[in-house]
Image: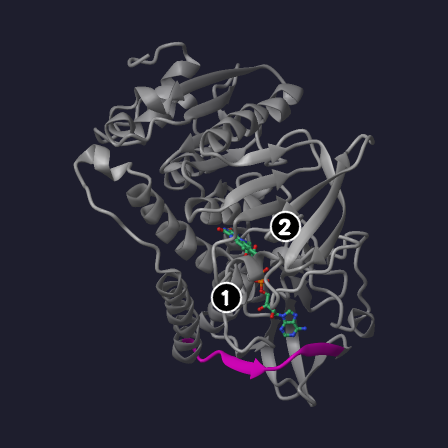
Amino acid sequence: MADYDFDVLVIGAGPGGYVAAIRAAQLGLKTACVESRATLGGTCLNVGCIPSKAMLHASELFEEAASGKLAKLGIKGTVELDLETMHAQRRDAVKGLTGGIEYLFKKNKVEWLKGHAAFTSADTVDVAGKSYRAKNIVIATGSSVTPLPGITVDNEAQIIVDSTGALELAKVPGHMVVIGGGVIGLELGSVWKRLGAKVTVVEYLDQILPGMDGEIRKEANKVFKKQGIQFKLSTKVTGAEVKDGKAVLTVEPSAGGDAETIDADVVLVSIGRRPNTDGLALDKAGLSVNGRGQVEIDHDFQTKVPGIWAIGDCVPGPMLAHKAEDEGIAVAENIAGLTGIVNHEIIPSVVYTMPEIAGVGLTEEQAKERGEIRVGKFPMMANSRAKTNHEGDGLVKVIADAKTDRVLGVWIIASLGGTMIAQAAQTMEFGGTSEDIAYTCHAHPTHSEALKEAAMAVQGKPIHI
Ligand SMILES: Cc1cc2nc3c(=O)[nH]c(=O)nc-3n(C[C@H](O)[C@H](O)[C@H](O)COP(=O)(O)OP(=O)(O)OC[C@H]3O[C@@H](n4cnc5c(N)ncnc54)[C@H](O)[C@@H]3O)c2cc1C
């Protein structure tokens, strides 16, 4: 250790990096974590998962009260929007949680090196003009918003914004156009729709939520349309201009055809995220990136250079906080000589709209390609708790192998879908069957009973439909 400043130096303090640093320190390794942002927690805690959920939660409560839905339950009265207070509670949540990571660093003796890290050799990085040598370096630099060529985002002006700008809008736009019908666009579009904006989602593909199960994508589209969100599918945005404080978008059919313009008060560009690998001077460490800008790794999260590891959004795989966290634990355990494993076949994904949309494992389309399957479905409308709570939109779908009954995938649209999917992931992690779910006693009345019934439906024997 004499020659090294640290056993482990992690670059980036997002959910991948801060978790890796804490676990490495817990395992007795002298650990530092470099972060250039003013606060810890990365994209997720500062401008991603947490602030978006703070706005989703508050806007959902507002919409329930303002739209008269609560009146049906006998709760009457007028409500008014205090957007500044709504933003303040979002900022409070971020402050509390990012401060919490700082506390955990102190508790676990992880040293926070403030500044931007760049490699100067395979075992040395420069941070704010100081050189640090480490036996192991973990690249956990995350991702940033993908720009759309020809469209300039200016979060300060609040007309053409990215997801960070869309969290901070000082007033509810009259018309918001969301470019991209993926998770982030639908979540933030839902926030502003609930607060009173007209929202139009423009999507290049013929359906929203790419990568999810086909039936679930269609059903989700129906649910969002019922909520008043408008969609322009198979449509590409070819330009945007800002004129007199408004945006004018030019769009045309993805397959080619006549162009048209759409006026918007705010345009949210949310076409995806790209890895943060520029500025790391990877070449000095003997590393390069693949065609998608990602750092390639092996099963153990090792790059091709011994002693350099990489995890999270900057490596291939879904860009999700829980995937990054699990990789953070696994990489630290591998560095410590233990066996750290992440099962990348079973990473749940959730869209935190109302209802929530959740999935894990194979889509029906993917499962069919691999062999014979059985599918069981159950509508949330037939679940007593969801129906009682007026949350009947959606369904649960269980996909199982026809011969072994092993669960291959589960897809859920339900108000509590994001919570329900954990049971499906655990069943799949244990190699469980649809029968295992069907014969597990589920508390009544709960939304989770819909998962049990969908599993019973795999054998054609649900009770309540
Ligand atoms: C609006 C929004 C909502 C989201 N909601 C969800 C959600 O609900 N659930 C979910 O699972 N995921 C969500 N995500 C995605 C999630 O935020 C990311 O998958 C996750 O943060 C990735 O973690 P990470 O540790 O790989 O990287 P990041 O969280 O991006 O952290 C990387 C950190 O590294 C720092 N860094 C980069 N380069 C350097 C350098 N050279 N030197 C020093 N520091 C550096 C960056 O400043 C950053 O803080 C959301 C994202 C957005 C934008």
Residue for point 45% across, 60% down = 51
> Can residue 161 be seen in this snapshot?
no
Cβ at disc 2 under 8 Å from ligand 1: yes
- Where does the magenta region start and end? 108-119
> Residue 46: which disc?
1
Where is residue 355? Give x, y as percent.
Answer: 41, 36
Horizontal side of 271 relative to 257 (left or right) equals left
Judge from the rendering whether residue 259 lies leftward or rightward of residue 80; answer left or right.
right
* Residue at 35% across, 24% down: 380
Mark 2 nearby-residue class (10 Å; few <14, some 14–19, many ≥20): many
- In three-dimensional space, the C-alpha distance between marks 1 and 2, rounded to whole angstroms, equals 17 Å
Secondary structure beneath dot 2 equals loop
359 sits left or right of 370 in the view? left
Name the residue tied to disc 2. 270
* In the depicted structure, whether residue 186 falls above or below residue 258: below
Name which residue lies at 35% across and 10% down: 461
